Amino acid sequence: MALIDLRGIYKVYDMGAEKVHALNGVDLEVERGEYVAIMGSSGSGKSTLMNLLGCLDTPSDGSYILNGTAVQELDDSELAAIRNKEIGFVFQTFNLLARTDALHNVELPLIYAGLSRAERRERAKRALERVGLGSRMNHQPNELSGGQRQRVAIARALVNDPSILLADEPTGNLDSATSEEIMHLFDELHQAGNTVVLVTHEPDIAEHAWRKVMLRDGKVTSDQPTARAEAAAAAAPVS
Amino acid sequence: MVFLENFRIALGALRANLMRSILTTLGIIIGVAAVIGVVSIVQGLQYTITQQLQGVGATFIAVSAKNDRSNIPGVAARQVKLTSEDAQAIEERVPGVKLMSPFILGRAVVKYKDRKHNPLMTIGATENYQDVTNQTVDRGRFFSQVDLDNHRKVTVIGPKIADELNLGPDPLGKEIYIDIYPATVIGIMEKKGQNLGMDFDDIVYVPFSSAVNLFGRNAADQVQVRLQATSAESVPQVKDGIARLLRQRHKIPTSEPDDFEIQTQDEILKTVNSVLGSVTAVVGGVVGIALLVGGIGIMNIMLVSVTERTREIGVRKAVGARRQDVLLQFLIEAVTLSLIGGGIGLALGYGLGAAISKLIPGFPPAHVPLWAVGLAIGFSAGVGIFFGIYPAAKASRLDPIEALRYE
């Protein structure tokens, strides 16, 4: 069974007089270890889809099975627990806690997972080392560059060993050189076996993924391998 | 564990806005400081008075005339008599009386050579007075039965009188004037100090008969009686005996109330405690209002804090904080805020009480009982919970998607 299994997903927002159909019957499967980019212009429904994938919201209709759990049936607390366990968020605006050093920021999900202080420390350190910030653990966000902040955010997303890394425009606030570094980090994480779902509207960022899902008006309009995946497939020896 | 972590987060958030936190808790600080200040003074008073009353012993009984204070204008209050004959009768006819002394109170100027002084009071008493009221003579002696029987012109004075009249290192045997009557100093009372603004060392003691000369014949009809029962157990019995005797002597019909008052040590303590208790209650009411205002301040600042930290709440929820985690975080923050206020108020109030009781001469030292500390802490925590629950609930109900998008 696929890690992510979306079937007939609808999301309708009731805006008083009219109803807005943000998602209009989306079917999507993502296997463990995949690197998927979700693309679309604003209003295409990609933010809504990302919120559903991240268990921040539940669909109006349809079924979402994440790692064997039927998400649409969960209540508020259970959603929080599944976010804690299965999802690692990386946001465009980093969303680190101000006046809180990198180590404590990375520890945050582990607090809600109920881990002991010592164990949290240990795992947060390892996550920070993994993103190359081993020497910056006690710096606060305002003492870090944009790229470093995003690395802290990625460490925070990784620290709980989630099923999915869910990145929403992770390079939207970074210059192109730093963007490259961050995308390179995602490549590494993917190669290490993580499942990455990337939401973006920039085609060249999407090319880092191996699969590209296009959304328009709340529907999937195309779902195909990226140029990179095709090149890799062409280079592979025919068996 | 999450609880402890929440406490750490709360402290961090409060430190981050230190000035704001202090201003917010000011209401609580003032409220708690006021209650602790007043309680510490009242308790100090109560402690000293209790101590003093216990000094006279559990067998102590006081009898005095109950003068109607008529509220009807133009109608003079009936003058009720309690005579030295009444006192005599009590001693002779009520079983269980160990020692008895009638006394009268008045004011008279004392003189020695060119020195003049107006003492707090002059007490005319019998030889038993010293033992009945449990007092000690520091130098010399109290007057005796012989002094009284022979109408000797003697006096026992408080140490303050000796100082005021400049009697020198050896006041015993010196002849002073009380009003126009000469009297030889035969004793100096032990130093007792001040209480409730009264200087108990500023008292002149003369034999009962001398006091009658001094204050006039009518004074003998207005005596007060102090006595000691043989044992604490016999106090109620003695009290009943005195009441029956006096009603009989004063010819009071059964339908009329007593025209005298009998107070035991126990009852005096109760009266004092009830007066001080009502003072505490009134202050408690005022403080309740201060705490209410302080609580509203805390609610206000917590609401601001929740709005300011909307994104933080969004992030926490995104990484797995449940509603109750967020609720607890902000609730703990509110309670920590009000508890810190309570703690500062406690220290400040005690300091205030101590300072005030030091400033007023003769005032007993401030005393903060444990229950007041518990009450102050409990109340501040209660205020924190009560006024923190609404902002905390508001924070916990935030939609994570909206919160993350909040600018």
Image: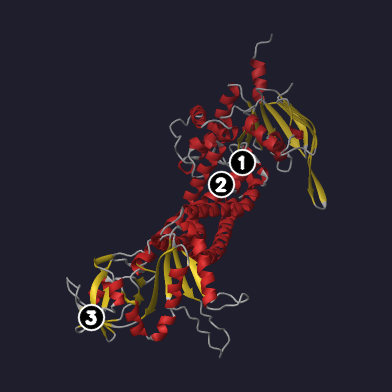
Q: Which mark is residue A170?
A: none
Amino acid type, label 3: Ile
**Residue depicted at 43% across the width and 69% down the height:** B91
Q: Is residue B224 visible?
A: yes
Q: Position of residue B331 (x, y in %)?
A: 59, 48
**Residue depicted at 61% across the width and 48% down the height:** B310
Assess whether mark 2 and mark 1 are in contact (beta carbons under 8 angstroms).
no
Is residue B141 rendered to the left or right of residue B388? left
Q: Earlier in the sequence, mark 3 or mark 2?
A: 3
Q: Which residue is mark 3?
A: B176
Amino acid type, label 1: Asp
Q: Mark 3: give few (<14), some (14-19) or many (20+) Cα within 10 Å.
A: many
Q: Which residue is mark 2?
A: B332
Q: Position of residue B380 (x, y in %)?
A: 54, 54
Nearer to us in this view, B372 or A157: B372
Disc 2, SS = helix
**Residue depicted at 51% across the width and 44% down the height:** A98
Against A12, residue B197 (above or below) is below
Q: Position of residue B156 (x, y in %)?
A: 27, 73
Against A187, residue B171 (above or below) is below
Against B115, residue B380 (above or below) is above
Nearer to us in this view, B364 or B405: B364
Q: Which residue is mark 1?
A: B325
Q: Looking at the picture, do discs 3 and 2 lie on one chain?
A: yes
Q: Position of residue B101 (x, y in %)?
A: 39, 70
The Cα atoms of the two marked residues, 1 and 3, are separated by 82 Å
Q: Mark 2: give few (<14), some (14-19) or many (20+) Cα within 10 Å.
A: many
Q: Earlier in the sequence, mark 1 or mark 2?
A: 1
